[in-house]
Structures are given as C-alpha cells and as structure tokens.
Image (cartoon, rainbow, N blue to C red):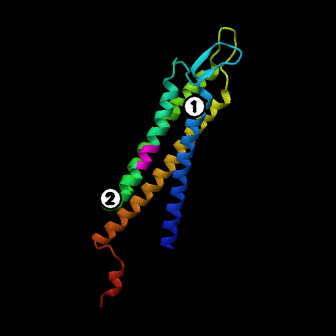
Amino acid sequence: MGCLSSLCRKIFLGLLSLAKVAISIAIVCIVTIHLYHVQVKNSKVRIGCLMMGSVKGDSVCEYTYAVCGLSMVLSLVTSLLLCITCNLCGLGDWFEFGIGAVQTAWWVIASIIISKNVRDSNAYEFADGSKLPKEGWRNSVAVLAWINSGIAAVMALIFLFQACKCLKNACSCCCGDDDDDKFNRV
C-alpha cells in the first residue's frame, strides 16, 4: 500500500506541476496575443497594456510575464537540483515545501496585483464614455492566476505532509520509539 500511495502522490504532483506550467503558458499567450500593444478598433489609439488599471503603461503586462516566467524557471531549477543532489540527501521534501510555500506566496501576491489592475481596467472609461476592449481576456488572466495560486498551495501542503511524515519516521527510528521491540523481548 505504501508504494502505491507514494506512486499516486508523485503522479498527482506531476500532474499539478504540468497544470501549473500549462496555466503559466496560457497566461503568457493571452497577454501577448490579446492584451499587450493593442490597437483599438476604429481608432488610432494604441494601448500598451489592457491590464494597466490605474498604472498607465506596459508595466502590468511585463510584471505578468515575469511572474509566469520566474515561476516556471524556479520549478525547473528545483526539479533539476533534487535530481542532481539525490533528493538533497534526504531533505528534499522540506526543500520542496519551502519552494512550494514561496511559489504560493508569489502567486497569491501576483493574483492580488493582477486582479486589482484588471478590476481597475474594466472600470476605466475613455472621455467619450467607451470602455477598454477585451474585458473577458483580462478576467481570464486574473482567474488563471488565482488557479495557479491554489495549485501552488495544494502542492505546498502535500510537500509539508510528506516532510512531516518523514520527520516522524526518522524520530521514531532514532529515538527508540519502535513498538516491535516490545514483542521481541523474552
């Protein structure tokens, strides 16, 4: 049963990791294709970023690129480091939990910033009373960012439970807390 549950946990974490990378790529594609350097139809107006909110310019779109890119790079570096160092000599679960907690915080902060700017952009009106186009694409970026926050949190919790389980096993082995010794005494 232990090997099967360990395999299921690893497969589940692998699928969550793939989902997180796929969502990051989707966010980058949506921003690139639909929200960055957009020409407003029937107008000579060119907008740098349709998620600008109260911050005028391209900085919110560029921030979104940075969040997605750094998250993917951090995941790749973590995987390679754990592979090269043989699970960090047994501390891999704690390392993965630490990275998972950092990524959770990273995505929650990014989701708050993106959501605020999306809300401000959706409420923005031009002088003629018209609104910024592509509201649905802006909303989808905010929702996807929150989904990545949730995935990162679930992964961090799984790593924490696994690390605590390993700590419990190490303590019971080293501290002589083994119940099997009671039955072996004569």
Answer whether residue 74 is magenta in the image.
yes
Would you say 174 lies left or right of 43 here? left
Residue holding disc 2:
85
The answer to whether residue 45 is left or right of residue 68 is right
Which residue is at the far right?
Answer: 42
* Mark 1 secondary-structure assignment: helix
Where 81 sits versus 63, above or below?
Answer: below
| Closer mark to the observer between disc 2 and disc 1 | 1
- Report the magenta residues as a range: 72-76
The numbered disc on residue 32 is: 1
- Position of residue 168 measured from the top left corner of the image (x, y, whole percent): 36, 64
Q: What residue type is labelled 2?
A: Thr
Q: Is label 2 in a helix, a strand or a loop?
A: loop
Determine whether, in the image, residue 123 is placed left or right of residue 9.
right
Q: Position of residue 111 (x, y in %)?
A: 52, 34
Q: Which amino acid does label 1 sit on?
A: Thr
> Residue lying furthest left in this view?
175
Q: Is residue 176 visible?
A: yes
Compare marks 2 and 1 and give the one earlier in the sequence: 1
